[in-house]
Amino acid sequence: MDANLQRRVQRYGWDKASLHYEKFWEDQLRPAQEWLLETAQIQPGETIIDVACGTGLLSFPLAEATGESGAVLGTDISENMIELSRQIVKEKELHNVSFERMDGEALNISDATFDVAICSLGLMYMPTASIGISEMYRVLKPGGRMLSLVWGERSHCGWAEVFPIVETKVSSEVCPLFFQLGTANVLELHMQRAGFKETWTGRKRVDLHYDSDEEAYGAAFAGGPVAMAYSRFPEEMKQIAHREYLESIHAYKIGKRYNVPGEFVLASGVKR
């Protein structure tokens, strides 16, 4: 897929998903994001860049951790995600966190600016993840550290059928290599090639809990990476996609609720 086309798909797809993202994913992603925050060991006064920040689910806890003497910059390719985050900054009158729309593969930032670079569930959507990693390496100060969270292996993510379900109805190629970074130690190898030292990788299994059919397929379609393709489905096709997806996760249904398995991979490294 052409890289520029993929960027447009991601930009406008996440614009579509922005209003639904927190509703369907905030609680489900919390265990993995808390794991990242605990591992990051943010210190007061540190400067942090949160790449592919979405609506700031991590940016705001990072700002709290670094305190008024530190600063957080959240960047995302989606203008709508950035605008929602800015609204929260204004409502809460926060002074140590800001948001800018940027492509993670071309950060408009000077070299050696930040103490910490974070990318939570964003690298899978970049046309060339290695470029995104190299950009984070570039903007880190010597001694700075990077942490990246990605989805794990496809066979460990019970919701993975959403991609082929969409592909059978429309050619979208949302993220053809989505699960590659979570396979074996691929993410850590990318970080090492970018120059990171003292690299580390961990895995965490987490069940994604949904209270109803509507929540389960809402997260998969309206609030996730296929949102743009899904928005173009006629209503009848949407209903078919919902049924197919619910059939694919039926094994994880208990009563009316779903406990859908997922796996996360967290990798870290230091710029020396």
Image (cartoon, grey):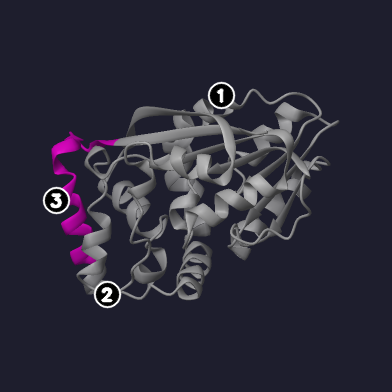
Q: Is residue 101 left or right of residue 147?
A: right
Relative to 25, is 50 on the left or the right? Answer: right
From the viewer's perspective, is the residue at label 2 or at label 3 nearer? 2
Q: What amino acid type should be assigned to the residue bearing mark 1?
A: Thr
Which is more foreground, mark 3 or mark 1?
1
Q: Are marks 1 and 2 in contact (CB under 8 Å)?
A: no
Q: Is residue 241 left or right of residue 44?
A: left
Amino acid at dot 2? Val
**Residue in the picture at 63% in, 47% down:** 136
The residue labelled by disc 1 is: 39
Point out which mark residue 8 bears. none
- Residues drawn in magenta: 239-261
**Precedes in sequence: disc 2 or disc 3:** 2
204 shown above or below 129: above
Image coordinates for residue 215, horizontal then vertical, percent: 34, 47
> Could you tell me which secondary element the residue under label 2 belongs to?
loop
**Residue named by callout 3:** 247
Where residue 220 appears, as percent x and y from the top left, is 33, 53
Compare marks 3 and 1 and give the one earlier in the sequence. 1
- Image mark for residue 170: 2
User: Which image quadrant: the C terminus?
Assistant: top right
Residue 242 sits inside the magenta stretch: yes
For the N terminus, the image quarter is: bottom left
Q: Provide the secondary structure element on which disc 1 rests.
A: helix
**2 or 272: nearer the eye?**
272
Mark 1 vs mark 2: give the one in front.
Answer: 1
Residue depicted at 38% across the width and 28% down the height: 203
